[in-house]
């Protein structure tokens, strides 16, 4: 099983950015923990702050990987293009968020991606990624 974890804008700052919301752990450190926790899964990780690069990555892996765990950051609430890219590929996508977006600003309550995803997991901190990986294994 080969799964891509795909992170969008500002998630490269995890561990530094707003630790009261996002915690103190970098994603790179957490990714190493996920690799230990899921040894039977071939995990790849990619992050970009650019919408077009995220679309290109979805197109690149969207017909060959077993799954994609995608935290699109703020693009979740604005990007019809990312939603269209998810709809265009065969690989199932699970949308994840570290924070509970429904407990935050009003504009974060709507996802342009969710309708095209297998499911959505949010509000469990970094553990949201592990929950998505468990869902792909079931």
Image (spheres, grey):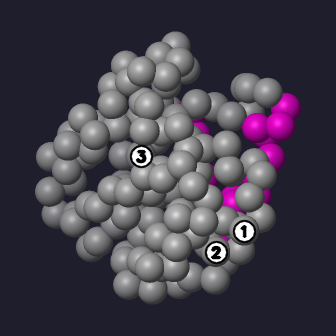
- Graded by Cα atoms within 10 Å as few (under 14), some (14 to 19) or many (20 or more), the crowding at tag 2 reads some
Mark 1 and mark 2 in contact (Cβ < 8 Å)? yes
Left or right of residue 18, residue 127 in this image: left
60 and 107: which is toward the camera:
60
Label 3 or label 1, whichever comes before in sequence order: 1
The nearer-to-camera label among 3 and 1 is 1
Residue range in magenta is 106-123
For residue 56, above or below residue 137: below
Please rate how many residues cluster around mark 3, counting C-alpha atoms within 10 Å: few if below 14, some from 14 to 19, many from 20.
Answer: many
Q: Can residue 2 be spotted in the picture? A: yes
Provide the residue designation for mark 1: 81
Q: Position of residue 29 (x, y in %)?
A: 24, 35
Q: Is 117 placed above or below 128 here?
A: below
Q: Which residue is mark 3?
A: 129
Can you say which quadrant of the picture contains the C terminus? Answer: bottom left
Please tell me which residue lies in front, 82 or 39. Answer: 82
Picture residue at 62% right of the left edge, 72% below the top: 86
Taking depth in this image into account, of 71 and 132 the one nearest to the observer is: 71
Give left or right: position of 110 versus 40: right
Give SS at disc 1.
Answer: helix
Between circles 2 and 3, the one closer to the viewer is: 2
Q: Report helix, strand or loop for mark 3.
A: helix
Residue located at (33% from left, 56% from top): 45
């Amino acid at each position: 099983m080969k799964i891509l974890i795909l992170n969008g804008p500002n998630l490269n700052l995890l561990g530094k950015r707003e630790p009261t919301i996002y915690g103190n752990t970098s994603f790179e450190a957490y990714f190493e923990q996920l690799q230990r926790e899921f040894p039977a899964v071939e995990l790849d990780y990619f992050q970009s702050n650019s919408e077009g690069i995220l679309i290109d990555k979805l197109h690149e892996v969207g017909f060959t990987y077993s799954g994609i765990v995608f935290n699109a950051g703020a693009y979740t609430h604005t990007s019809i293009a990312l939603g269209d890219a998810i709809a265009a590929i065969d690989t199932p996508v699970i949308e994840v968020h570290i924070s509970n977006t429904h407990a935050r600003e009003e504009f974060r309550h709507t996802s342009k991606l969710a309708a095209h995803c297998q499911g959505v997991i949010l509000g469990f901190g970094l553990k949201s990624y592990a929950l998505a990986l468990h869902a792909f294994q079931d």
